C-alpha cells in the first residue's frame, strides 16, 4: 500500500520510511508524487493543522495520506510558541526564534 506523507522534509520522510517500510508500506513525500502545494496552517491546534495538510493532499490524490504537525512548547512561556514555532514573533529563521525564546 502506498502512503503519501504530507511533507517534503527529508528527515521526516526517512523516519516514516524506517517505521512503515518494514510493515510493507511504500512511503512517498508529497513532491515524489508531484504534489507541489504549501498548505496554510490556519488551525488553532497541532491536530487541526495536521488535518488541513492531510485533507489538502487527499483532495488532490484520493490516496492514503499521513500528516503531522509539531512545535516547541515551553512551559515557562505559557506553552508558547506552540503551533507558531515556525513563525514565532514574526521571525522565520530557527536561529532568530531560538534567541527570542531564550531571552
Image: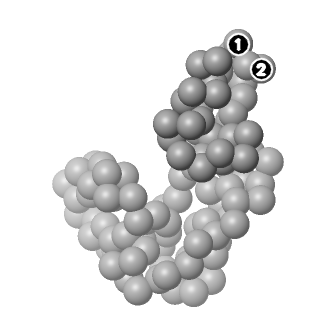
What is the basis of the colouring in this image?
A: one colour
Residue at the image point whose x is 33% and y is 71% from the top:
28
20, above or below 78, in the image: below
| Residue named by callout 2 | 78
Q: Quadrant of the C terminus?
A: top right
Residue at the image point whose x is 72% and y is 29% from the top:
80
Quadrant housing residue 79: top right
The numbered disc on residue 85 is none
Q: Residues within 10 Å of mark 2 (few under 14, many from 20)?
A: few
Does residue 83 show up? no
Q: CA distance from mark 2 to mark 1?
A: 6 Å
Rendered location of residue 96, percent (x, y) = 56, 37
Q: Quadrant of the N terminus?
A: bottom left
In the orientation shown, which residue stands out farthest toward the top?
76
- Left or right, 1 with reference to 35: left
40, above or below 68, in the image: below
42, above or below 101, in the image: below
Q: Residues within 10 Å of mark 1 (few under 14, many from 20)?
A: few
Residue at the image point whose x is 80% and y is 48% from the top:
44
Rendered location of residue 85, percent (x, y) = 63, 40
- Left or right, 12 with reference to 51: left
Rendered location of residue 101, percent (x, y) = 63, 24
The numbered disc on residue 76 is 1
Contact between labelled residues 1 and 2, with CB atoms less than 8 Å apart? yes
Residue situated in front as seen by the camera: 50 or 96: 96
Secondary structure at badge 2 equals: loop
Residue at the image point whose x is 64% and y is 70% from the top:
39
Secondary structure at badge 1 equals: helix
Residue situated in front as seen by the camera: 98 or 1: 98
Does residue 61 show up? yes
Amino acid at each position: 500500500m502506498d502512503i503519501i506523507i504530507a511533507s517534503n522534509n527529508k528527515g521526516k520522510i526517512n523516519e516514516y520510511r524506517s517505521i512503515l517500510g518494514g510493515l510493507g508500506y511504500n512511503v512517498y513525500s508529497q513532491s515524489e508524487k508531484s504534489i507541489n502545494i504549501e498548505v496554510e496552517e490556519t488551525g488553532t491546534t497541532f491536530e487541526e493543522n495536521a488535518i488541513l495538510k492531510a485533507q489538502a493532499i487527499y483532495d488532490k490524490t484520493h490516496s492514503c495520506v499521513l500528516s503531522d504537525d509539531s512545535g516547541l512548547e515551553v512551559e515557562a512561556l505559557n506553552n508558547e510558541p506552540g503551533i507558531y514555532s515556525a513563525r514565532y514573533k514574526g521571525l522565520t529563521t530557527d536561529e532568530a526564534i531560538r534567541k527570542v525564546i531564550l531571552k
